[in-house]
Image (cartoon, rainbow, N blue to C red):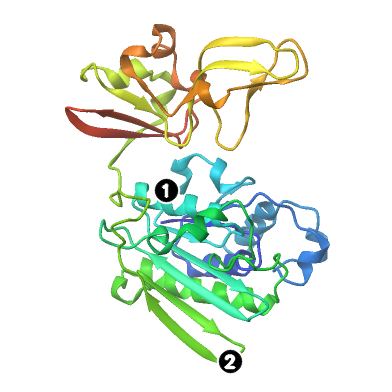
Amino acid sequence: MRAVVVGAGGNVGSHLIPHLARMGRFETVALIDPDRYEEKNLRSQEIVPDEIGRPKVLVQAGRLRRIAPDLRVEAHQTFVERVAPGALLADVILSCPDSRAARQHVNEWARRLGVPWIDAGIEADRLLVRVDAYGTGPDDPCLECGWDERHYASLEQRYACDPDDPRAPATNAPSGLGALAAALMAVECEKLIEGRNEEVLFGRELLLDLLHHRQYVTATRRNPDCRLMDHAAWPLTLLDGSSRRRTLRDLLAGGPPERRVSIPGRDFARLLRCGGCGHEEHGLFLTLPGRESVRDCPRCAGSLVAAGFDRTPEIAASAIPREWAETPLDRLGVRPGDLIRLTGETEKPTTWVVGELR
């Protein structure tokens, strides 16, 4: 089994890691977190002084291996929005990041990939601990089913893991709150991997108000007006290790001419421009999620950037240049874990997930 932990090194995530290692159920655990430990984290997170300054994912990867030496650990020191979607393919995603945008990203890809996920957070000032779980059925509510305009307006802000309170303070919560949230996540995770789905918090939220010693369980229904309109998972076809030799022409062979190609989470660009010297390159390029720069400028120390009007999320198969169509996927910049999606008016969409390019 495989688990993915988003926000693996924070107030909740760092306390969750030992629980996952001791479950003895997972063969692989993938850790995603962009940050390094700072001295202020000693108060709130499961670390020791010698670990200050180190990447959080590497510290927690070491902790996993010390407890479970046979466990395979993947460490991604980056924002979850920047990893290839296939990196989130798992039996369960455990989410405890510090931004609403990261949660929205997890929500969308968990839906697309058909992966159940458990989310947790705390609010230090009010001593609140929250845990939610989301199933994979098309009629199951998702995170955004309960959102309104206020949530979307504050997507770019980072919080202390409470997605419903825009006044939440920066992360520096008591260690005990994070440990409690992590323990509750671990219990829900064990129920899920044991197949006790009726007992998992799917479509519900557990909120502990420790200041007033109260517990609340609330339910969310599938919202027909949810902005994530399609809740169905995409059927996936794996491109295995031979992907290095595959080309877009191979994938498009035998299909209707009106097919369109997309690599979800990335854009195609037809023009790159350097803001420093003005150098331009025309062609077809793949952007990287969360990054303006596509490549370095060959004429100066600047970066080649694709402007918004030069980008498109999909391209007609008939418009793909021959050179591009016949170039192996890895040389086009396709990463392991990227998805390649083919859509057309006369057939069902096909989605490939790229394996290791070796």
- Quarter of the image for residue 25 reads bottom left
Name the spot of residue 66 as percent of width and height, x first. 64, 62
Q: Residue furthest front?
A: 149
Instruction: Pinpoint residue 95: horizontal percent, then vertical percent.
Output: 52, 60
Q: Secondary structure at mark 1?
A: helix
Q: Position of residue 310 (x, y in %)?
A: 52, 20
Question: Is 290 on the left-hand or right-hand side of 275?
Answer: left
| Mark 1 residue crowding within 10 angstroms, few (<14) / some (14–19) / many (20+) | some
Q: Say which mark, if any, is on residue 212.
A: 2
- Determine the residue positioned at 45% across, 78% down: 206
| Element class at badge 2 | loop
Could you tell me the amino acid type at mark 1?
Answer: Trp
Amino acid under disc 2: His
Mark 1 in CB contact with mark 2 (< 8 angstroms): no
Give the label, 1 or 2, closer to the camera.
2
Q: Quadrant of residue 97?
A: bottom right
Residue 151 in view: yes
